[in-house]
């Protein structure tokens, strides 16, 4: 393994970081000390010439890898024709083609309609507005640990870290948070299997929330991530997701799935919710949809997206250049990257399970995921005490070893590289990860 041992950040990166510190908002800090020069596939280079394996993919976004030639060509071709015209006012083919494709892959057996946005948080805003409009109900149920975005409506649903909400109250009224099924860390303190077999989060909604707090017939929607992302890459038991669907059906509540991180082939299927065998009413998408060009989508059953002309809109939503990138991205994913995500993700999980045998921080930890949405939760002991400082040390050490990897949840790391990553690059990244883990464990006195 070739590891550049020059200290990172190098002088060029440090100069950018210093200038950034003087002018950019402090809300983005602290960040990783990496300043990109260029990227190709699942690798990136910093401005000092150091190379890195990219297991972060710009927060699970660069689905086809950095600057895939077909995506770049699609962007150039579209930019040469026109860059903007406003889909709220005029028609253009590339937008319709994206909508047709998204409607064709929508995870429900009913015709779909599509609203295109610029980002994930906007897709969530649109979904919630649509749910309120369609049902004429005011309340929304969301989950602890959920991340749905940062704009006021989406932030009201987010319950991942309190710093994301603190100082911004009052948020939108009518949002109720409930526990999310997490068999490894059942909030009700139950054993893993018991939590799977009978999820008390469902009882909580049915017996506590609906009986003491809010009548079910005033709830417009339940929104959930089929696999929690920022919350820690947590895969819930499918029975929990199925029971949420049942509750929705029983009470006329819309089921919104936030597929912003888990969708578009990342889990080895178009949508994370497909792993649970459930059909939602509304899907929110973004991130990987256009390989890094800003685009998001609300995809809903046709009868649900029946709001009238003028009810919603966006100047830039469905930007033509982003749509062209999306068409190229969706084709590449369909033609092989989705299958690759399933295969490489399974390999990463196996490799991490093997590491569990000799790494104390992984020994009692959680390794879980679908496709290339794999999480590893680091813990200090059998009692599963979160190894937060150690996780942070691994991330920092990884930079020095030429690996970009992101944390999530309290003490987890996520493995979410581009869906095109090949086995050799996966192995190289895993070697760099293991080296970083070893160094962090040694520094913490665990090895
Ligand atoms: C599940 C989920 N929903 C919504 C968002 C918000 O997306 P954006 O940052 O594009 O607004 C994110 C971003 O991380 C996400 O992971």
Image: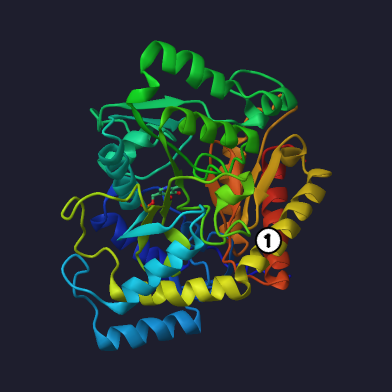
Quadrant housing the C terminus: top right
Above or below residue 194? Residue 8 is: below
Residue 336, position in %: x, y?
A: 63, 73
Q: How is the image coloured?
A: rainbow
Task: Identify the secondary structure beneath mark 1.
Answer: helix
Residue at x 28% of width, y 39% of height: 153
Return the residue nearer the eye: 230 or 399.
230
x and y percent of residue 87 in the render? Answer: 22, 68
Look at the picture and state if 203 lies above or below 254. Answer: above
Asked whether 47 or 232 is in front, the reply is 232
Question: Does residue 181 show up?
Answer: yes
Q: Residue placed at 66% from the left, 30% from the top?
A: 183
Q: Nearer the viewer, residue 434 or 40?
A: 40
Q: Which residue is mark 1?
A: 342
Q: Quadrant of the N terminus?
A: bottom right
> Which class describes the residues within 10 Å of circle 1: few (<14), some (14-19), or many (20+)?
many
């Amino acid at each position: 393994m070739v590891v550049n041992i020059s200290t990172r950040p190098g002088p060029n990166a440090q100069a950018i970081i210093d200038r950034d510190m003087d002018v950019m908002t402090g809300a983005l800090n602290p960040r990783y000390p990496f300043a990109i020069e260029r990227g190709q596939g699942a690798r990136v280079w910093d401005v000092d010439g150091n190379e890195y394996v990219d297991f972060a993919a710009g927060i699970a976004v660069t689905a086809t890898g950095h600057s895939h030639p077909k995506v770049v060509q699609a962007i150039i071709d579209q930019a040469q024709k026109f860059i903007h015209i406003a889909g709220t006012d005029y028609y253009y083919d590339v937008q319709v083609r994206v909508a047709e494709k998204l409607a064709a892959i929508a995870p429900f057996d009913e015709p779909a309609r599509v609203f295109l946005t610029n980002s994930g948080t906007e897709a969530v805003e649109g979904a919630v507005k649509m749910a309120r409009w369609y049902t004429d109900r005011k309340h929304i149920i969301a989950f602890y640990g959920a991340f749905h975005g940062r704009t006021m409506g989406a932030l009201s649903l987010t319950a991942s870290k309190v710093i994301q909400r603190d100082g911004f109250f009052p948020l939108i009224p009518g949002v109720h948070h409930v526990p999310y099924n997490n068999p490894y860390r059942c909030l009700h303190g139950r054993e893993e299997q018991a939590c799977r077999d009978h999820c008390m989060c469902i009882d909580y909604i049915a017996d506590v929330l609906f009986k003491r707090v809010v009548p079910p017939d005033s709830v417009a929607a339940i929104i959930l991530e089929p696999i929690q992302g920022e919350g820690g890459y947590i895969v819930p038991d499918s029975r929990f997701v199925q029971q949420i669907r049942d509750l929705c059906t029983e009470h006329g509540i819309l089921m919104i799935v936030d597929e912003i991180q888990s969708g578009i082939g990342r889990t080895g299927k178009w949508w994370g919710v497909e792993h649970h065998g459930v059909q939602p009413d509304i899907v929110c998408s973004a991130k990987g949809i256009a390989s890094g060009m800003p685009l998001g989508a609300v995809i809903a059953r046709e009868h649900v997206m029946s709001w009238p002309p003028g009810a919603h809109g966006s100047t830039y939503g469905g930007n033509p250049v982003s749509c062209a990138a999306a068409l190229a991205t969706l084709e590449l994913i369909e033609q092989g990257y989705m299958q690759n995500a399933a295969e490489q993700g399974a390999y990463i999980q196996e490799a991490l399970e093997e590491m569990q045998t000799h790494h104390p921080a992984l020994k009692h930890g959680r390794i879980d995921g679908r496709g290339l949405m794999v999480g590893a939760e680091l813990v200090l002991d059998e009692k599963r005490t979160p190894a937060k400082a150690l996780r942070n040390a691994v991330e920092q050490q990884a930079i020095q070893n030429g690996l970009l990897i992101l944390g999530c949840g309290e003490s987890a790391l996520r493995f979410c590289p581009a869906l095109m990553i090949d086995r050799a690059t996966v192995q190289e990244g895993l070697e760099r990860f293991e080296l970083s883990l070893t160094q962090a464990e040694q520094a913490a006195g665990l090895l």
